Amino acid sequence: MNEASTALGQAFTTIATGLRLALRLAAARIPALAPLLLLTIHNRLGRMVLRLDRLVLQWQAGTFPKPRPARPQAAEPRPQSPQRPYIPAGQAWLIRLAQPAVHSIYPVELFLARPDTQAFLQAVPQAGRLLRPLCRMLGITPPAILKRPRMPPASPRPVRPRAPCREPRTYQAFLATLAPPRAPAGPDFYASHIFRT
């Protein structure tokens, strides 16, 4: 893992080092978990350190890019990305896999309570995407500053005028559409057809 170049990055590196040691202890105790713990989660922690340190550098230099506007959704479906390695989920899932990781809870809470961390998270809320999963994997209640930013309410859709309702069709109106009934035969009809001589 590359060394961090900022104070926050170095503090986060210390936390990641403790978590990696807990992963090695758990992998030695349960060899079946070694690929998951040492490869997947071990590498994920390294990427978290590098991304956090890069965000801190951009924040300190004032070169943090402005958030891009939301892109319109493409009509064509996106190509499927390669399958990512399985990572457990749920509250405190890392502690359930590696019990020694419980010793990293207090350092993470101290890291989140630092004034420079608070100022960094206030200026760069995107960093919450890195720290919220860390809190979840250790079962830590994230502070208020790590809450997800609320999305602006969507603009209401224009109300389309409805077509006027047709009047209900009555039984009498239905009968009026049928062919008119034939006139009943008179007495001369019956006299000429029944009483023939």
Image: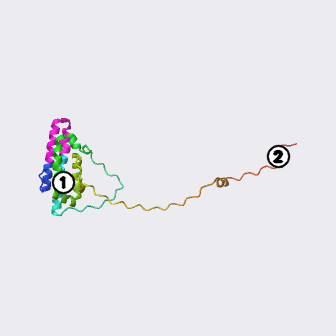
Residue 127 located left or right of residue 196? left
Residue at 19 percent across and 47 percent down: it is: 44
Q: Residues within 10 Å of mark 1 (few under 14, many from 20)?
A: some
Q: Residues within 10 Å of mark 2 (few under 14, many from 20)?
A: few
Q: Position of residue 59 (x, y in %)?
A: 18, 61
Instruction: In this rendered view, identify the residue nearer to me: 91 or 113.
Output: 113
The residue sitting at the bottom extreme is 62
| Corner quadrant of residue 177 | bottom right
Q: Position of residue 165 (x, y in %)?
A: 55, 59
- Mark 1 to mark 2: distance in Å? 108 Å
Q: Amino acid at mark 2?
A: Tyr
Instruction: In this rendered view, identify the residue nearer to me: 78 or 43.
Output: 43
Residue identified by numbered label 1? 112
Residue at 16 percent across and 36 percent down: it is: 29
Name the mark nearer the viewer: 1 or 2.
1
| Callout 1 touching callout 2 (CB < 8 Å) | no
Range covered by the magenta-colored residues: 16-42
| Above or below, comparing residue 59 to residue 91 in the picture | below
